Image (spheres, grey):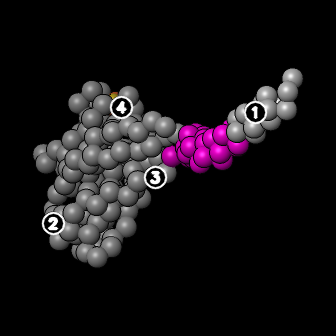
């Protein structure tokens, strides 16, 4: 093998190693971006329900909320209904509309003055307590906060 061919081979190997090194360095951020979301825990989401002045003290208000949650690489959309029960001008309880017995949707019933579940004839009080029927526990209450005159609810992670 002559000197020229050997030099060419060495140069070829050096170029390949350099290309592999550059590719490795540039692929690290991409690998991190792909792997990190898999270890991220889903976080709870705060949703703005509306100005606190909009919620009547006389009657719980149903509010539809839409939000997205990321779990690893998967982003899911949710649409839920919650009930805002105003107990005072700045005192609110927000309940899931899902019955704690077998997950039917409850609705506010003016006649019964409670959250009524038609599936097994259950009734929940305005503060979520079970008044009658088979549900084993009160309606699920969701965390709330007031910021800038708006009521927010935290949807479960
Ligand atoms: S699902 Fe509501 S009472 Fe059974």
Name the disc covering residue 54, or none: 2
Q: How far apart are marks 1 and 3 (CA)?
A: 60 Å
**Closest to the observer, 97 or 3:** 3
Residue 29 picture location, percent across and down: 59, 48
User: Which corner quadrant holds the N terminus?
Assistant: top right
Q: Does the magenta stretch include residue 18?
A: yes
Q: Mark 3 points at which residue?
A: 44
- SS at circle 1: helix
Q: Name the residue under label 4.
A: 103
Disc 4 residue: CB within 8 Å of ligand 1: yes
Residue in the image at 26% along x and 48% along y: 65
The Cα–Cα distance between marks 3 and 2, rounded to whole angstroms, is: 25 Å
Q: Indicate if the residue with disc 3 has its beta carbon within 8 Å of ligand 1.
A: no
Secondary structure found at label 2: helix
Q: Does dot 3 land on a helix, a strand or a loop? A: loop
Q: Where is residue 92 in the image (x, y as percent from the top left)?
A: 31, 65
Q: Disc 1 and disc 4: Cα gap in Å?
A: 74 Å
Cα gap from disc 1 to disc 2, whole angstroms: 79 Å
User: Going from the N terminus, do you reach mark 3 or mark 2 first?
Assistant: 3
């Amino acid at each position: 093998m002559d000197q020229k061919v050997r030099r060419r081979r060495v140069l070829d190997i050096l170029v390949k190693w350099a290309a592999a090194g550059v590719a490795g360095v540039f692929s690290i951020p991409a690998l991190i971006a792909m792997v990190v979301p898999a270890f991220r825990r889903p976080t709870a989401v705060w949703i703005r329900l509306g100005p606190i002045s909009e919620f009547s003290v006389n009657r719980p208000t149903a509010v539809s909320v839409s939000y997205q949650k990321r779990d690893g690489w998967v982003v899911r959309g949710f649409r839920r209904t919650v009930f805002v029960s105003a107990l005072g001008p700045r005192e609110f309880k927000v309940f899931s509309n899902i019955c704690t017995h077998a997950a039917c949707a409850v609705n506010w019933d003016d006649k019964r003055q409670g959250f009524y579940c038609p599936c097994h004839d259950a009734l929940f009080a305005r503060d979520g307590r079970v008044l009658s029927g088979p549900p084993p526990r009160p309606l699920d209450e969701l965390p709330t906060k007031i910021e800038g005159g708006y009521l927010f609810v935290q949807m479960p992670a």
